[in-house]
């Protein structure tokens, strides 16, 4: 009885403590931060972009020759297609359009992350292929939320907070008819993968495989295995890339990473 009296308060405390600890871990996870950032952008667009002029699709996953690509937001309008990549980050942000890696600084700590313009470029090319649209009518937009501050000059399409709304509204020249807008929205809705947790997990796994040199890859042209090859001549001699194992019959290549 004495043991039970001692353990009962501890058990009761653990019943509340464990869920609270799990909640704290979730709130600090990169996935949750990314989800919150996407919801903030989604909410801003809902209230500040005319829903009749700007048709909105969120969390769009499309199949690509080397797997899948996941796009945070796509706004289809008579004035063009706007592909929005969200970054929920705090601290100071350093970067430029030509740099492969940007830097986030929080006090004395620095973290590297992929140039979001390059990341979004893959999304643009996927949409260009899926819709058959001229590249000049597809616009990349980067949105930083979370209290970050740019410490280097940024291109006009790299924005903070609701700055992306002003950037999108700056395009006033119609390039698509209403019928074309409707057709593109219909094509995306029919061609996207279902926005489920399973789709997201599969996409993340494919990203992991693309960054893992030991993972098995298939050639996007013929389906054969890709192997790591070395550039033997020229200014890029010594660099590695993925090449088709049936070379020279198939000359497909992909960058390493």
Image (cartoon, rainbow, N blue to C red):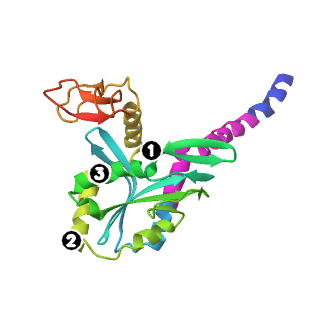
Circle 2 residue: 179
Label 3: which secondary element = helix
The image shows residue 28 at horizontal and vertical percentages of: 61, 44
Q: Which mark is residue 251?
A: none
Circle 3 residue: 125
Which of pointers 1 and 3 lies earlier in the amino acid sequence?
1
Which image quarter is the N terminus in? Answer: top right
Circle 1 residue: 100
Q: Please tell me how crowded label 2 is: few (under 14), some (14-19), or many (20+) other residues with Cα within 10 Å.
A: few
Q: Nearer the viewer, mark 2 or mark 3?
A: 3
Residue at image position (25%, 68%) is 181
Residue at image position (72%, 34%) is 14
C-alpha distance separating marks 1 and 3: 18 Å
Which of pointers 2 and 3 lies earlier in the amino acid sequence?
3
Residues in magenta, as a range: 13-40
Which of pointers 2 and 1 lies earlier in the amino acid sequence?
1
Residue 1 showing in the rendered view: no
């Amino acid at each position: 009885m004495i043991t039970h009296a001692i353990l009962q308060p501890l058990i009761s405390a653990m019943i509340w403590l464990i869920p609270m600890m799990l909640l704290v871990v979730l709130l600090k996870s990169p996935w949750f931060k990314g989800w919150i950032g996407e919801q903030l952008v989604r909410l801003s667009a809902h209230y500040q972009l005319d829903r009749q002029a700007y048709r909105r699709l969120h969390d769009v996953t499309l199949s690509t020759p080397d797997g899948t690509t996941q796009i945070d937001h796509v706004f289809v309008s008579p004035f063009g297609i706007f592909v929005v990549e969200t970054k929920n980050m705090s601290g100071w942000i350093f970067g430029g359009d030509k740099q492969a890696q940007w830097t986030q600084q929080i006090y004395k700590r620095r973290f590297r992350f992929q140039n979001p313009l390059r990341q979004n470029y893959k999304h643009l090319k996927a949409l260009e292929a899926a819709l058959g649209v001229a590249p000049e009518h597809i616009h990349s937009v980067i949105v930083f939320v979370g209290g970050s501050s740019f410490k280097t000059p940024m291109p006009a399409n790299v924005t903070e907070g609701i700055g992306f709304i002003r950037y999108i509204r700056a395009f006033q020249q119609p390039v698509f008819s209403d019928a074309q807008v409707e057709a593109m929205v219909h094509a995306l809705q029919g061609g996207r993968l279902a926005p489920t947790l399973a789709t997201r997990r599969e996409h993340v796994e494919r990203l992991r495989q693309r960054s893992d040199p030991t993972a098995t890859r298939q050639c996007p042209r013929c389906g054969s295995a890709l192997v790591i090859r070395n550039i033997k001549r020229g200014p890029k001699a010594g660099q590695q890339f993925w090449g088709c194992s049936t070379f020279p019959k198939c000359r497909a290549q992909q960058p390493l990473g």
